[in-house]
Amino acid sequence: MTLTTYPSRRIPEQLLTQFARKTPRIIMESLPPEQGIYLPKIVSKPVKKGHGFKFGIFAGIHGDEEGGVLAAKQIIRWASEKPEELGDYELHVFPVCNPTGRLLGTRHNHNGLDLNREFWYGSLEPEVIYLEGELRREKYDGIIALHSDTDSDGCYGFVSGALLSEHLLKPALEAASEHLPSNRLPLIDGFLASEGIIKEGYLGILSAPPEQTVKPLEIVFETPGLAPLAQQADAAVAAVKTILAEYRLLQAYAPNL
Ligand SMILES: [Zn+2]
């Protein structure tokens, strides 16, 4: 199936019919009815009940970045088909965070706002209100946001802290480079960068609630927006899988980072 030709309302239905009925581990947890905006959330429960690392994966908050949406769909398929590889993870995938922008093919939502600058400022946009509620309620251990950047020739990412940069984003970029190279420029998107890693970021992006006491891992992963969509998706999926694997290792010897 080709995702790009779907009206966004149909994606979760496809996912449900393909995976959810066959695999009870994959569930559609919520369909917020606010103002008719349909923002899907697909939950993959851990194989063994009990504690698992709970990660939120968010794609398509910019409506014209289809690579991340495709990657999110592949991650849902992976969770469905190879649950043993996920093991102790509980994944919450939000494949289309800006459904109206996606329908219009625009970065901004239908109100003309960049939703990824609206978080934790009392935004009245229903998508942001909903996602803020989810972030507050779920208290994720990790938040991965998938984006693409048409101004970049390669993959890069945002993360805070040297440890997480070295142990998570660096190997993620290495894994992604099997599909698309990293951006090696010293300045990316106006930020100082080193080997595709930026340690600062924008205000108002989708992130953990300010009051969350145990700060989660937060990574923004960007693919080059002009590269073929399938390659962008493969690169992002490789990065996400690597982040999950490396995070598990890191927790084993340095818990509660
Ligand atoms: Zn973006």
Image: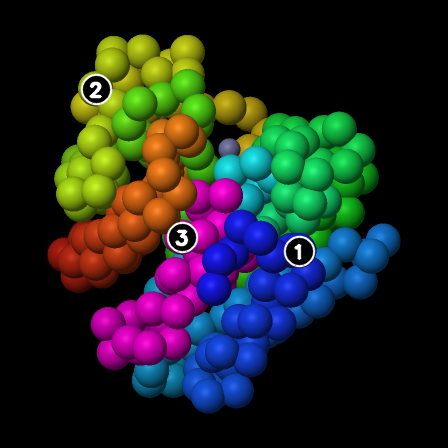
Three-letter code, disc 2: Arg
Label 3 sits on residue: 71
Mark 1: give few (<14), some (14-19) or many (20+) Cα within 10 Å. Answer: few
Structure colour scheme: rainbow
| Magenta-drawn segment | 66-95
Q: Of discs 1 and 3, which sits in the foreground? A: 1
CA–CA distance in space, label 1 to label 2: 36 Å
Q: Is mark 3 within 8 Å of ligand 1?
A: no
Q: Is residue 140 left or right of residue 104?
A: left
Q: Position of residue 131 (x, y in %)?
A: 64, 51
Secondary structure mostly seen in magenta is helix
Residue 157 lies, in percent from the top left, at 33, 32
Mark 2, residue position? 184
Q: Amino acid at mark 1?
A: Pro
Residue at disc 2, secondary structure: loop
Give the number of the disc on residue 54: none
| Residue depicted at 80% across the width and 39% down the height | 124
The residue that mark 1 highlights is 7
**Relative to the observer, which residue lies in front, 109 or 129?**
109
Secondary structure under tag 3 reads helix
Is residue 43 in view? Answer: yes
Label whose residue precedes the other's in the sequence (3 or 2) = 3
Direction from residue 168 to residue 188 in the image, left or right = right
Under circle 1, the secondary element is loop
